[in-house]
Amino acid sequence: MPQLDKLYYTRKDFLYVNIFWLLFLEFRNGGGLMKFVFFSLFAFMFFAGCSATWHGVKEDTSHSVEWTKEQVNHGAAYIKEKTE
């Protein structure tokens, strides 16, 4: 059990204190850095989402093309079978 007359700090405690003071000073001074960080994070998330969506669109389109080819070939084989 820790002694009550002494304070024990870990690295995590110092990290939280440093982050708190960084945020406090940034917002007190207009928050230029924080605006830049938040905008950069938002832009990164936006482009990552668009990239993932575009990849999904390309994949779905290629699957649709293959499905359409299979259906056309199946239909052609059916017609050829019925007309012979």
Image (cartoon, rainbow, N blue to C red):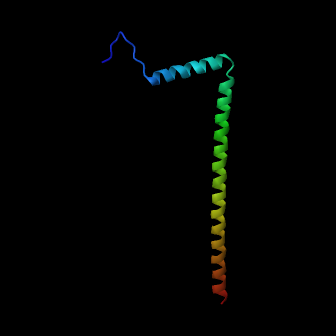
Residue furthest out toward the bottom = 84
Q: Quadrant of residue 38?
A: top right
Residue furthest out toward the left = 1
Q: Quadrant of residue 72?
A: bottom right
Query: Residue 76: image x %, image y %?
Result: 67, 80
Q: How many marks?
A: 0
Q: Quadrant of the N terminus?
A: top left
Residue furthest out toward the top = 5
Residue at x 63%, y 59% (from the top left corner): 59
Query: Residue 75: image x %, image y %?
Result: 65, 77
- Residue closer to the observer: 46 or 74: 46
Q: Quadrant of the C terminus?
A: bottom right
Query: Residue 15: image x %, image y %?
Result: 50, 23
- Residue closer to the observer: 67 or 14: 14
Residue at x 63%, y 72% (from the top left corner): 70
- Residue closer to the observer: 48 or 53: 48
Above-or-below relation of 19 to 64: above
Residue at x 66%, y 82% (from the top left corner): 79
Q: Quadrant of residue 83?
A: bottom right
Residue at x 64%, y 35% (from the top left corner): 41
Above-or-below relation of 32 to 72: above
Query: Residue 56: image x %, image y %?
Result: 63, 54
